[in-house]
């Protein structure tokens, strides 16, 4: 208000929520962790990642059906730009990681089908 007032204007804040809070169900997390460890080895699984606020609409899917949001690391110190923050002009992805992501999805689907 003070800065706007200096210039003869007024200011206000309008807050709109655009996504619900994303909370992964414990059981789905345990399942995903087990599948990922089996796929890429437990030394490649990070479960103590620092929590931070961000926006994503995956939580809207979770309102309809249980799911788990998993991060697939795509940074590679040997490939330029792959360790830069997402949504920046110089971000790049190590496309070799896409095979790992596809294998995780396939193994999770197989695990799901085999459990019945």
Image: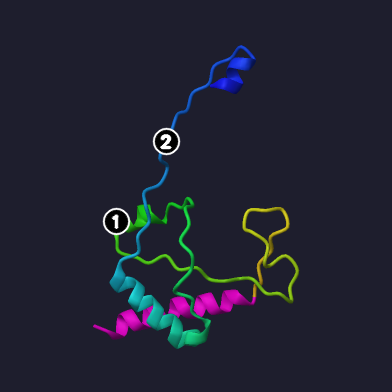
Compared with 56, 97 (above or below) is below
Compared with 8, 67 (above or below) is below
Task: Bin the neighbour count of mark 2 within 10 Å (Cα to Cα): few under 14, some 14-19, many 20 and up.
Answer: few
Q: Residue at x 47, y 28 (%)?
A: 13
Compared with 17, 78 (above or below) is below
Q: Is residue 40 left or right of residue 78?
A: left
For this orientation, the residue located farthest to the left is 116
The residue identified by callout 2 is 16
Q: Is residue 32 magenta?
A: no
The residue identified by callout 1 is 64
Quarter residue 66 falls in: bottom left
Alpha carbon of mark 2 to alpha carbon of mark 1: how far? 22 Å
User: SS at mark 1?
Assistant: helix
User: SS at mark 2?
Assistant: loop
Q: Is residue 74 left or right of residue 68?
A: right
Q: Residue at x 51, y 86 (%)?
A: 43
């Amino acid at each position: 208000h003070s800065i706007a007032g200096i210039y003869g204007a007024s200011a206000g804040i309008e807050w709109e929520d655009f996504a619900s809070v994303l909370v992964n169900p414990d059981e789905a997390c345990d399942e995903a962790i087990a599948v990922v460890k089996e796929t890429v080895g437990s030394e490649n699984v990070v479960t103590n990642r620092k929590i931070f606020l961000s926006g994503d609409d995956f939580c809207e899917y979770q309102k309809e059906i249980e799911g788990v949001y998993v991060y697939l690391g795509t940074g590679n110190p040997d490939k330029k730009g792959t360790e830069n923050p997402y949504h920046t002009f110089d971000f790049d992805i190590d496309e070799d990681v896409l095979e790992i992501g596809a294998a995780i999805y396939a193994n999770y689907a197989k695990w799901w089908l085999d459990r019945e």
